[in-house]
Amino acid sequence: MMDPQIDPAAPLPNLPGHSSGGRLERILRAGKFAVTAELNPPDSADPRDVYDRALVLSEVCDAINATDASGANCHMSSVGICSLLTRAGYAVIMQISCRDRNRIAIQGDVLGAAAMGVQNILCLTGDGVQAGDQPEAKPVFDFDSTSLLRCIRGMRDEGKFLSGRKITVPPRVFLGGAANPFVPPLDHRAIHIGKKIAAGAQFIQTQYCYDVPMLRKFMDKVREQGLHEKAFFLIGVGPLPSSKTARWMRSNVPGVHIPDAVIDRMEKSKNEKAEGKQLAIDLIQEIKEIEGVHGVHVMAYRQEEFVNEIIHASGVMKNRQPRRAPRPAEPVSVVA
């Protein structure tokens, strides 16, 4: 049973050897199998659109990722979502993409996020603007993900901006990086992740895994280099709604590898959506048994209820206390 003192709304002190007072770091360092999930931001300025999705996810995961214009498409900002969710008592992972902001803006966002209660940050280079629906946008890429990790680690551990100017109260954050074990050159994937870990990554979230044998080979390399003892690995999992979607993802989503056997399994099923759900459950249960894997990161675009069902059915949160953080009271309208 989970430690009853781990309350999503309660401020927690840093434990010895911890970078943050956050729930996710505590769960991982306690040796529990962690579950994170992705909240897909709304195309809306209504906070209820965020709270409704977060409430569904909070019952089945240890932290919620707030994406940062993923796919180079504009949605509610990651920092805005984190502002809403931290105020409501949720554990969040703020994603920062290097595509849209320079180092001055990013360092300011890190301090602002930490002040709001954000205790986990995932550092991403970001998709190119040509991948989104506004390809005429000006890309920035002042950092890449590795230099961003190095920058935030310096802010936290040395208490300094990149300029050398002192930070009076450094941000206490748990830092993450992304990995894709399924794109060539496969032999260099673990080496690449090792560089991110050396730069400051303490946890790694991966791209969707649909090929467990390939993941096992990647984790063999990770263990050979001792990286599983230096960072926590959370493997990406997601349902496939249909074989048609699977084929489209394989052809159009950079870095997504879906074997023919998975598509054949979908096509032979009588109910492809149900089969896609069972596939995700099976993957979670297989992945959990791989040495060096510390958790899963579950993603399904704007299907938070489906994610909830998959995680429940997988059994990985069995005997874990649900995290039903309350939604803040609706603001009172004032009529002049």
Image (cartoon, grey):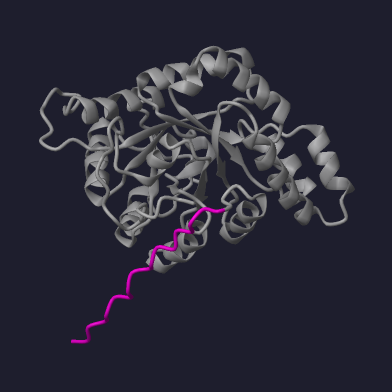
Q: Is residue 198 above or below residue 143?
A: above
Residue 90 placed where, x, y %? 38, 56
Q: Residue furthest bottom?
A: 336
Q: Nearer the viewer, residue 89 or 177?
A: 89
Quadrant of the rendered structure where residue 168 is?
top left
Q: Is residue 252 left or right of residue 76?
A: right
Q: Is residue 321 above or below residue 35?
A: below
Residue 44 placed where, x, y %? 43, 63
Q: Is residue 264 visible?
A: yes
Q: Which residues are magenta?
A: 319-336
Is 332 within the magenta?
A: yes
Q: Nearer the viewer, residue 208 or 291?
A: 291
Is 163 within the magenta?
A: no
Is the C terminus in the top left, top right, bottom left or bottom right quadrant?
Answer: bottom left
Residue drawn at (83%, 35%) of the image: 261
Q: Is residue 37 above or below residue 218?
A: below
Q: Is residue 95 visible?
A: no
> Predominant secondary structure in magenta?
loop
Residue drawn at (38%, 67%) of the image: 326
Q: Is residue 104 left or right of residue 62?
A: left
Q: Nearer the viewer, residue 264 or 97?
A: 264
Residue 95 placed where, x, y %? 40, 41
Quadrant of the rendered structure where residue 251 is?
top right
